[in-house]
Amino acid sequence: MVDPSLNSSSVEMDAVVADPPRRSRRRPARADVLAIGAYALLGVLVCLNYWGDVQHRVSSHLPTDHSWFEWLFAHGAYSVRHLENPLFTARQNAPDGVNMMANTSLLGVTLPLAPLTMLLGPQVMYALYLGAALSATAATSYWTLSRHLVRSRGAAFVGGAFLGFAPGIVHHANGQPNFVSNFLLPLIVSRVLRLGEPGRWRRNGVALGLLVAYQIFINEEMLLLTALACLVVVAAYAVQRPRAARERAGTFLAAVGVGGGVALLLVAYPIWFQFNGPQSYRGLQGGVFHNWGEDLMAFVTFPRDSVAGNEAVEKTIGLTEQNTWFGWPLVLVGLVALALLVRRSVPARILAVLVVLFTIASIGPVVRFDGAETDVAGPWAYVPDDLPLVEMMMPTRLSLVVVAAVGVLLALAWDALSRTGRRPAVRLVGYAAVVAALLPLFPRPLPAQHIDPPPHFITAGGWRPYVPAGRTLVPVPIPSNVHGLPTLRWSALTGQEFPIPAGYFIGPNDLGEGVFGAPNRPTSTLIYSTMDANQVPEITPENRRQAVEDLRFWRASVVVLGPNPREAVLRDLMTALLGPPQRVDDVWLWDVRDRV
């Protein structure tokens, strides 16, 4: 597919840190505009199902996560409007609040976009940003590849498209925009690889520090994966080019020191707040993510949200995030490209090291094949669960480094093909192979489902006379990561003007370990069990005493039940606990100000 002689020693690691030969100003500019335009159209396509009724649609696969990120956009707007500390909020999980630095808070996005959120609302902002983040990641990848690694704009376009819209990235677009917000990562990687430039260690170090600091407020996990990948890249380059590595080591380390100092200066307090501020925690209870390893069959399976995808296969393979669902054609093309390029290309050899190391690392504690666990222990079986940072990691997400390596490999392969000179047959066959491998992965619009709007009582402000300052509106059901998705949106879609108890977040349990949601109180547990059984249990005086105690803890002033599939049984339950309700507008209401 690729003539290896065309990717010889002239295209090595030095090409990553030096601008490729310039062409005329007009052609690259036009190519750049066309590439970015194509990425923007792809972003619109992926989010198309949301735009059909953006006010009343959420992700079909992760509706709770979708609503959480709508809430985060509202949090950014609330923090800016009220000039409150965005690192913490008392608008959810009242009265304890939520440590936003200890959660996926996307502050680097929600705060600067706060004016747009105030203008358009969190639902529109979510859909708009999701498509823009996908497109922006592809665009910065294209820019980095075209300016620092490949000569062909077509090669940069193919690599950028894959890095922005790879199967694993599109999969995370189902309710997790933080994992598609990777537009700074190509800039961080290119800056790391330029730290050894003579005479530019201060400028490169400062630029890297600023990028790293900002990425911390977008997605720390992706920053950690990028740092691990850069560490491997630098080490692999040093092994292959020891003399060049020694010559640049002093400048490189000086730039790293400057970058680290700049980043530390900017994020020292937020990071301290994350681990030591109110509602911080240490690790996740039971290391709940450690079993999330990559299934070996996933690599050759077509992803669900692609034109060749099949949901039935997803159910067969089981628990996975589809990070490496490349499909067998791309795996085959990638292996052939590596075999042809790796002999003469330092970048290709480095990519091979990344693919091997991070594929193995993503397997998890047990090797899984086609949905079944084997008797073979995976690498994570030998990793203690309580190691710092490691305790929070999900093995399958290490394979996102493999995704990035495949994207760069595609760019290298296409670039080599573009320079086959007098061998047009080789070029055509190679192009056809790459296109044939990528076409089945072309993304489909993300599946979306209808969600009812909040009650008119909530959106029209009918709650205001009942919720004085310092008191809480208690929605029924109580918001949580399992129940109460609609009631969490009551807060998001009203600009968080009233605080709510519990919610969807990670906070500490009694031992200081991270758990999802607030520890259930007796009344919330009773509400959830009644919903599950669709039947009111026998209510005792102790249940009523606990309900008053819980309302007092939540600083409740009013309990509100809106339209709900379990509305009748929930109304009967709350009536048994609190007495007859009032019918106000389109909700049932219990005014409890005189009881708590």
Image (cartoon, rainbow, N blue to C red):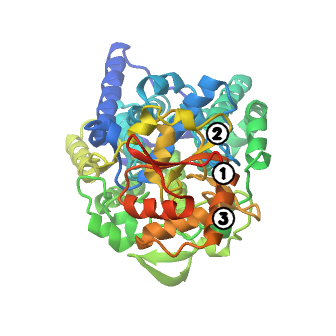
Mark 3 — residue?
A: 546
Q: Looking at the image, is 226 positioned above or below residue 510? A: above
User: In 3D space, how far apart are the residues under numbered discs 3 and 1 (Cα atoms)?
Assistant: 13 Å
Q: Nearer the viewer, mark 2 or mark 3?
A: 3
Q: Nearer the viewer, mark 3 or mark 1?
A: 1
Which amino acid type is marked by label 1? Arg
Q: Earlier in the sequence, mark 1 or mark 2?
A: 2
The residue nearer to you, when weighing 174 against 416, is 174
Pinpoint residue 315: horizontal percent, then vertical percent.
34, 70
At 36% from the left and 24% from the top, the residue drawn is: 32
Q: Residues within 10 Å of mark 3 (few under 14, many from 20)?
A: some
Mark 1 — residue?
A: 595
The residue nearer to you, when weighing 548 against 13, is 548
Pinpoint residue 445: horizontal percent, then vertical percent.
27, 45
- Left-right relation of 571 to 305: right
Q: Earlier in the sequence, mark 2 or mark 3?
A: 2
Q: Is residue 16 visible?
A: no
Look at the numbered discs 1 and 2 and tell me whether their residues touch, using CB distance below 8 Å.
Answer: no
Q: Secondary structure at mark 1?
A: loop
Q: Looking at the image, is 288 positioned above or below residue 241? A: below
Q: Residues within 10 Å of mark 1 (few under 14, many from 20)?
A: few
Q: Is residue 178 visible?
A: yes
At 36% from the left and 39% from the top, the residue drawn is: 161
Res. 216 mark: 2
Which amino acid type is marked by label 3? Gln
Q: Earlier in the sequence, mark 3 or mark 1?
A: 3
Q: Which of the 4 image quadrants contains residue 121?
A: top left
At 38% from the left and 75% from the top, the residue drawn is: 370
User: In 3D space, how far apart are the residues under numbered discs 2 and 3 (Cα atoms)?
Assistant: 42 Å
Q: Secondary structure at mark 3?
A: helix
Q: Residues within 10 Å of mark 2 (few under 14, many from 20)?
A: many
User: In 3D space, how far apart are the residues under numbered discs 1 and 2 (Cα atoms)?
Assistant: 45 Å
